[in-house]
Amino acid sequence: QVQLVESGGGSVQAGGSLTLSCAASGETYLARSLAWFRQVPVKEREAVREAVAGIDTHTGGTYYADSVKGRFTMSRDSAKNTVYLQMNSLAPEDTALYYCAADRFGIDGITWKDQGWYTTWGQGTRVTVSS
């Protein structure tokens, strides 16, 4: 099994930056593909989980949601088994619980957004952006 631990969340004012980290441990070969999702509560207590960014560590393919392109950058440090999400120009609508997810199989431009594709999830780290 592989375990994922996110860190780096916090509170920031609009326009600020944060860097999230997701450290993989255990059988890290099971984390070929990693992605960041974020979850926001909507009315009626339903939570919507949105794909933010993903990376296939074998191909190097990196994917971003349109809402974060140009502002967020996903990167990895293979020696540390860690991926990062550098978030710049944060806006209140970026407020969410951010999750790291992993899977042993590769991803492409379609599958990376599918939360059902990923078998391992972290506990999440909260990001709050105030206006």
Image (cartoon, helix red, strand yellow):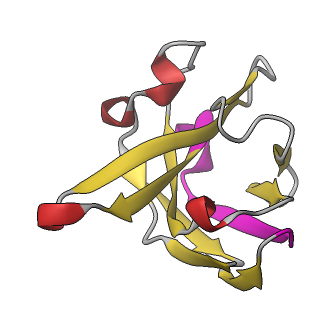
Q: Is residue 73 left or right of residue 50?
A: right
Q: Nearer the viewer, residue 66 or 106?
A: 66
What is the x, y in percent for residue 8? 72, 78
* Above/below status of 76 relative to 6: above
Residue 25, quarter of picture? bottom right
**Where, quadrant-wise, is the C terminus in this rendering?**
bottom right
Residue 19 on the magenta span: yes
> Which residue is the extreme one toward the left?
44
What is the x, y in percent for residue 6? 60, 71
> Which residue is the extreme one toward the front?
131
Q: Nearer the viewer, residue 106 or 93?
A: 93
Residue 68 visible (yes or no): yes
* Above/below status of 28 relative to 80: above
Residue 11, quarter of picture? bottom right
Q: Is residue 103 left or right of residue 67?
A: left
Residue 76 on the magenta span: no
* Above/below status of 5 relative to 1: below
Q: Residue at left 58%, top 60%?
A: 93
Total labels: the figure holds: 0
**What range of the chain is rendered magenta?**
15-35
Q: Nearer the viewer, residue 107 or 93?
A: 93
